[in-house]
Image: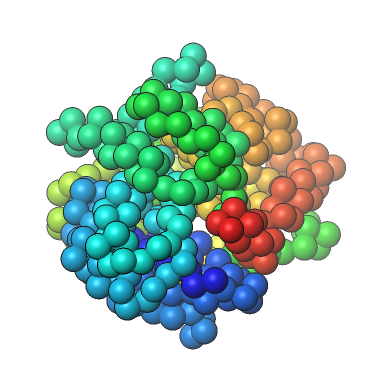
Amino acid sequence: MRVLYLLNVSNSSQLSADSGYTFADLLAPALTDAGAEVTVASPVPVGDPRVHFAPTTSPFTKYRARFDPGVDALVTLMRERQPEVVVANQIEAAPAIRAALLEAGVDALIAGYCHYLPFSFTDTGALELDPAMDDRGLGRSVLLAFAAGLAACDRVLVHSSTAASWTTAAAARTGVDLGDKLHIVPAPRDVRLVRDPDGILPPQGRATGLYNHRLYAHYGTARFTQLARHLIADAPVRLTVMDLFGTRSPERVRLDPSPERHLEELGTTDGVTITSDRGDRIRYRNLLADAHFGIAPFRPGCPWSMSVIDCQAMGLPVIGPRTGWLAEHIDNELLFDTDEQAVRITQRLATEPEFYLLHAKGAFASTADLTPEAVAARYLEAVR
């Protein structure tokens, strides 16, 4: 099977902060091991030399990635690579991919991977646009482009049951019937970030929590900052916050300056340490190993989080708000609705060794089926 994997890298200078690239870097070699001939079309190659590389230009903005897929370049790529399966990691580009395949005279299946959903649903079933995709009111257009992409796909792959439910509901509201196209294929855990929980020691009365998510406003960073102050004041914990971006380009800052604002506020909060892995996966592993628990993001439209999986694969219990995929995936004893509940959970993690070790082992076990080999098998089954 010849697989052409179209990958949009949002920040090629900070690959460690790009979960889509990390996913491809793990999955493409596993697909190759399973017998597929994989070409990754991307601004940067994946690490395995067995995976073919077709260089592409990174879109200047997140909106160009959705509205300007570059049909001319796609036609050339289809003619050169003659794929049997095209993986569209930018769902909105699927109609252009279909048109390019027609123009190139190539008959290939299009598998859209919903790596990111530009919407979410509240507990009452109300659809909410993701504010990250709603600058100057573009959110509705992004939603419709996403729906058009779903319609153009032969397969639609999502990370979780929550994502499947939301994607199905959003498709129905825009007149798209997914039929039997939808498949749940979770993302793989990083093989470099796996630690046997049997060797983990519980905290000795004080615990370190790690927040390793992007500091955009739409990730709920202001809500996390509020929680951080409560935890530090009322529980025996200190917090480590990762700066995943470093110095961003003026263009990216102009589009959304919220990470810089939140980073400055957190950097002046007592009990919070700001750190960075500097793009080094070994350093990132050591930062995880030095923590006792992780904290999930407060992003309403969270259909999946690689940072959460990173913590859990290292045997770190992750606490999180009772919302979206988090409520599906995280153990109920570690979910909270209020800061007070979160304080009680962290107190138990810091001071009750049996409670801590139970959830450390549970966190690790929740990622057992996420090896690249297992995910690649599910991927190939979905696209046959």
**Left of 83 or right of it: where is 290?**
right
Can residue 343 be spotted in the picture? no
| Residue 231, percent from left and from top | 55, 34
| Residue 150, percent from left and from top | 40, 41
Q: Looking at the picture, tell me which residue is in the foreground, 184 or 290.
A: 184
- Residue, far top: 124
Colouring convention used in this rendered image of the protein: rainbow
Which residue is located at x 37 percent, y 76 percent?
A: 81
Q: Looking at the picture, tell me which residue is in the foreground, 141 or 296.
A: 141
Which residue is located at x 80 percent, y 39 percent?
A: 355
- Residue, far front: 105
**Left of 5 or right of it: where is 98?**
left
On the rendered image, what quadrant is the C terminus found in? bottom right
Q: Which quadrant of the structure image shows residue 69? A: bottom left
| Residue 153, percent from left and from top | 42, 48
Can residue 156 be spotted in the picture? yes
| Residue 213, percent from left and from top | 45, 49
Q: Looking at the picture, tell me which residue is in the foreground, 353 or 330.
A: 330
